């Protein structure tokens, strides 16, 4: 195979290892996420009270596991963020929990043109050639069209992450904003037909 001119990290995160959180594990994660929600600067908005938490598949990158979450509030805003932790050694209990949260008034019901409902948060950087740095980005969301089976993250036409959809939800970790290129998320059916695509910047 000849050398490539698109030298960038691909498939850097571990694939999901667990299902959608439930039971006591979901309760433990919920404590962390709701504490982060309480610390959100409302910027003059009435955030209301969080509703049920929707959890998304886990992804592990750079020694930490990330489990994204969203919650619709009583004032019809959406809280979004993630809980992260260091996996326990040799099967031990997770440790070093941390959580990030924010809110938005941009919800899917107000945008019938959306095909994917996406959230994203930069986790760190990846240093590439000639001092260029890619923003390693956690992307999570829901497919708003039927028959979706897999999503891919693409940078300048190159697949840099891929994951199956679980209970209608998915989580990606991929390089973004690298050499002038930005991420797109593509939705595929089980036969490999593209159903939808969304840019993080639309």
Image: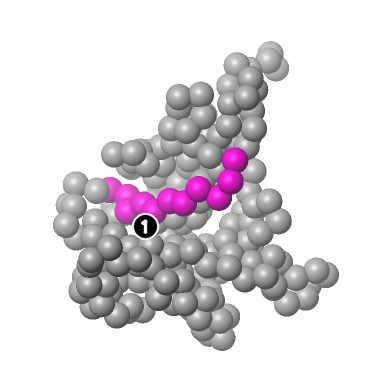
Is 24 a magenta residue?
Answer: no
Image position of 63 with respect to 41: above or below: above
Location of residue 83 (image quadrant) = bottom right
The location of residue 62, given as percent across then percent down, is 68, 51
Q: Quadrant of residue 74?
A: bottom left
Q: Which residues are magenta?
A: 115-125
Whole-percent x, y for residue 147 in the image: 35, 53
Residue at horizontal 42%, vertical 71%?
Answer: 39
Q: Residue furthest right?
A: 90
Taking the spot 59% from the left edge, 57% from the top edge, the residue there is 59
* Left-right relation of 66 to 87: left
Viewer-closest of 62 and 11: 62
Q: Residue at x 36, y 52 (%)?
A: 118
Q: Main secondary structure of the magenta part?
A: strand
Q: In the rendered view, does 58 fall on the left or right side of 156?
A: right
Q: Residue at x 62, y 71 (%)?
A: 97
- Mark 1, residue position: 142
């Amino acid at each position: 195979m000849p050398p490539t001119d698109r030298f960038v990290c691909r498939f850097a995160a571990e694939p999901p290892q667990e299902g959608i959180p439930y039971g006591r594990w979901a309760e433990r994660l919920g404590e962390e996420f709701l504490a982060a929600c309480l610390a959100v600067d409302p910027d003059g908005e009435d955030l209301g009270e969080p509703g049920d938490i929707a959890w998304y598949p886990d992804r592990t990158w750079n020694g930490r596991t990330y489990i994204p979450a969203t919650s619709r509030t009583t004032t019809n805003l959406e809280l979004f963020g993630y809980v992260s932790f260091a996996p326990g050694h040799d099967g031990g209990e997770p440790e070093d929990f941390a959580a990030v949260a924010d809110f938005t008034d941009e919800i899917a019901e107000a945008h019938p043109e959306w095909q994917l409902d996406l959230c994203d948060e930069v986790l760190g950087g990846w240093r590439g050639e000639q001092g260029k740095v890619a923003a390693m980005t956690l992307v999570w969301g829901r497919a708003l069209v039927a028959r979706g089976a897999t999503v891919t993250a693409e940078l300048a036409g190159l697949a840099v992450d891929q994951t199956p959809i679980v209970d209608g939800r998915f989580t990606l970790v991929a390089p973004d904003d690298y050499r002038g290129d930005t991420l797109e998320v593509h939705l595929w059916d089980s036969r490999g037909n593209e159903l939808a695509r969304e840019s993080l910047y639309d």
